[in-house]
Amino acid sequence: MNSRLLVALLCLVAVSSGCVIHDNGCDTCEVQGSPGDVRFMWTFGGKRCSDDPSVKGVNISIPGENLANGGRYPCNANGFDGIILHDFVPGTYSFDIEAVNYNNERIYVGSGRFTVNGNVSVNIDLTPLGQPTSYAYVNWLFPTQAGSSYPTCGQAGIAYVDARVDDSNWKRFNCSEGSGGNSVQSPYLDPGQHYLEVVALDSQIRPVYYYGGGFVSQNGTPVSVTAETWEIGGASVRWDLYDGNTRLYCSQAGVSQVSINFQDKFTGKWVYGLTGEFYGCDQAPVVFEFLRPGSYYVSIIATGSNGRVYRSPSNLPPIDVIAHQFPGPNGALTVPVARTN
């Protein structure tokens, strides 16, 4: 009997096993690599089939492949959230996958690629229809003393944690939600580079520790991100614009915004990159709450109408940022910013 006909007959009596019928037009051709089975395992925004009873089943489409039962499978078969598709020839395949409800409406979707050279497993986390296709699990740690273990939320004096990814809105969590082996889920994200910020707060909602750092999210696979926070202090800054000895209002100088930056006295590194943080000229004073303790030079630059440039002097004495101390507006440092051209 023709081998492809035999496989087709076997698949008719074994739909639940996930048979796949290949027809490459050649029964004797040699393909580099080893054939194998593909074991799909799925979740839905981190949830199992039993966690979301609205999921009726999962449909898989692999271009060029004829899947048994049209690629439609139960969400869970014999205690397994997934399906094993048998006898793939070596090569790289793309796939689309969707979960449907009992009205056969798509509610979760995903896609990806896999390479067969022997048996292979594909773990795919489908995301809600219309949402980006990745996210992160976030947990946080607090600074330790030499040789000691990471403190608990209570030992660190932390009651709440504010977190956000990129420029999204801050969300507040009870500290325990992301500590001691627990984690919180980020919003759904496009795959790629992102920036996480975490602020640890005491019971009086005062910032105590901070973390800021990048991570890369992946399509169809959540990533885990640990925010190892550090102690923070604050600074408060205001500015006066001058043309020679004449003090100017922002409107007189034609300045709409100023750039503020802090340079570490000992390392020379800039806190806010090469461009600084921008604020409205009339926004002073500005309070900074997430600075590492240390000694910093303050730099303020502004550009007015007709290209006039205003800059703070380079010989200002440094300011000291002390852990857990946050000067308010009344304690702001006033920086002279003079026209240079």
Image (spheres, helix red, strand yellow):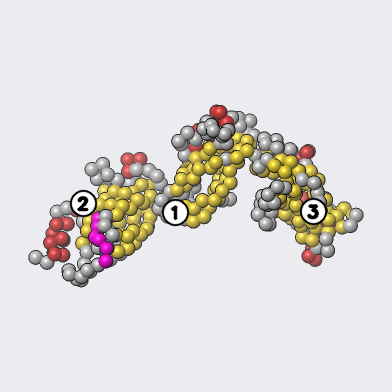
The residue identified by callout 3 is 314
Could you say which quadrant of the image residue 327 lies in? top right
Residue 114: where, in percent of width, then height?
33, 58
Marked residue nearer the N-terminal end (1 or 3) = 1
Marked residue nearer the N-terminal end (1 or 2) = 2
Residue 223: where, in percent of width, then height?
45, 48
Residue 128: where, in percent of width, then height?
41, 50
Q: Nearer the viewer, mark 1 or mark 2?
A: 1
Under mark 3, the amino acid is Ser
| Magenta-drawn segment | 32-38
**What residue lies at 77% left-to-right and 50% top-to-bottom?**
282
Tag 3's secondary structure? loop
The residue identified by callout 2 is 17
Under mark 1, the amino acid is Gln
Q: Nearer the viewer, mark 1 or mark 3?
A: 3
The residue identified by callout 1 is 218
> So how many labels did they put on this image?
3
Magenta-span inclusion, residue 331: no
Marked residue nearer the N-terminal end (3 or 2) = 2
Q: CA distance from mark 1 to mark 2?
A: 29 Å
For residue 8, say whether it is visible.
Answer: yes
User: In the rendered view of the protein, which quadrant contains the C terminus?
Assistant: bottom right
**Mark 1 neighbour density, 10 Å: few (under 14) some (14–19) many (20 or more):** some
